């Protein structure tokens, strides 16, 4: 049995994406997290 209180079927989704300097994107997730992505070509 899993002691984790989170639903194992939950996958975080992007709630908002904000463009940053020098080809970076800040992705605000619906689980409250913020992730920074480098999208340089």
Image (cartoon, rainbow, N blue to C red):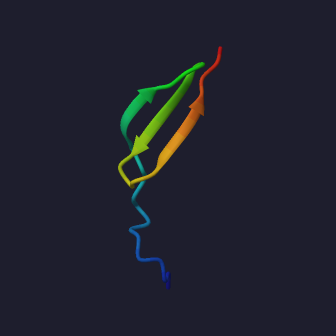
Q: Residue furthest front?
A: 21
Q: Residue at x 40, y 61 (%)?
A: 9
- Can you say whether 34 is above or below 9 in the image? above
Q: Is residue 32 left or right of residue 23?
A: left
**In front: 5, or 39?**
39
Query: Which quadrant holds residue 17?
Result: top left
Q: How many marks?
A: 0
| Residue 14 rendering spot, x and y as whole percentages | 39, 40
**In front: 35, or 12?**
35
| Residue 18 rendering spot, x and y as whole percentages | 42, 29
Q: Residue at x 41, y 42 (%)?
A: 28
| Residue 34 rendering spot, x and y as whole percentages | 47, 46
Q: Is residue 8 left or right of residue 24?
A: left
**In front: 24, or 14?**
24
- Can you say whether 39 is above or below 35 in the image? above
Q: Residue at x 41, y 77 (%)?
A: 5
Q: Residue furthest right?
A: 41
Q: Residue furthest top?
A: 41
Q: Residue at x 64, y 18 (%)?
A: 40
Of the 4 image quadrants, the one containing the C terminus is top right
């Amino acid at each position: 049995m899993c002691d984790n209180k989170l639903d194992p079927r939950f996958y975080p989704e992007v709630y908002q994406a904000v463009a940053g300097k020098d080809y970076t994107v800040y992705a605000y997730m619906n689980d409250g997290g913020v992730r920074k992505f480098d999208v340089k070509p």
